[in-house]
Image (tube, helix red, strand yellow):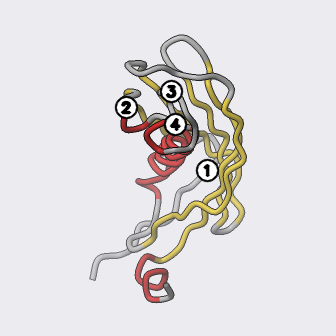
Amino acid sequence: MEALKPVTLAPGMRGEATTIVSHQNTAAALRSGAVEVFATPMMIALMEAAASQAIAGALQEGDITVGTMVHVRHLAASPIGQRVRATAELTGVNGRRLLFTVEAYDEKKKIGEGQHERFIVNRERFLANI
């Protein structure tokens, strides 16, 4: 049996995720608004993806993270065709609780900022309990 690698989570770990604004990820398409601009739920999903990416290589075998809190502000609209990039920095580790500072940018400006919390859980136990 292979030994489990130790968790090496530490503040300062960073992740990034990108997408292009298309009709499918606009507020109009998701019905979270009435215009063809990058939807707030999609910005949040991109921020969560960046946070997951930041710590993906540091988890023990069988562990995953689940999002438990998002507190963000959507600062500006991004039109179809813009590249959007979300960043996440791990700012706190308290046992299995992870806190990230998240931001999002399009090609011209900062479009979002806030905090995101994730918890480390064992995948099998998590799935068995739902």
Residues under numbered marks 1 and 3 in contact, where contact means CB atoms less than 8 Å apart: no
Amino acid at circle 1: Ala
- Left/right placement of residue 16 relative to residue 33 reads left
- Using the image, tell me which numbered label, if any, was put on residue 23: 2
Amino acid at circle 2: His
Helix, strand or loop under label 3? loop
Amino acid at circle 3: Val
Observer-side mark, 2 or 1, equals 2
CA–CA distance in space, label 1 to label 3: 35 Å
Quick one: label 1, few (<14), some, or many (20+) residues within 10 Å?
Answer: few
- Using the image, tell me which numbered label, if any, was put on residue 10: 1
- Residue occupying image coordinates x 37% and y 38%: 24
- According to the picture, the residue beneath numbered tag 3 turns out to be 37
Observer-side mark, 1 or 3, equals 3
CA–CA distance in space, label 3 to label 2: 8 Å
Residue closer to the observer: 47 or 65: 47
Residues under numbered marks 3 and 4 in contact, where contact means CB atoms less than 8 Å apart: yes
CA–CA distance in space, label 1 to label 4: 35 Å
Mark found first going from the N terminus, 1 or 4:
1
- Residue occupying image coordinates x 54% and y 64%: 66
Mark found first going from the N terminus, 2 or 1:
1
Residues under numbered marks 2 and 1 in contact, where contact means CB atoms less than 8 Å apart: no
Mark found first going from the N terminus, 1 or 3:
1
- Left/right placement of residue 107 relative to residue 81 reads right
- Using the image, tell me which numbered label, if any, was put on residue 27: 4
Helix, strand or loop under label 1? loop
Mark found first going from the N terminus, 3 or 2:
2
12 up-or-down from 80: above or below: below
Helix, strand or loop under label 4? helix
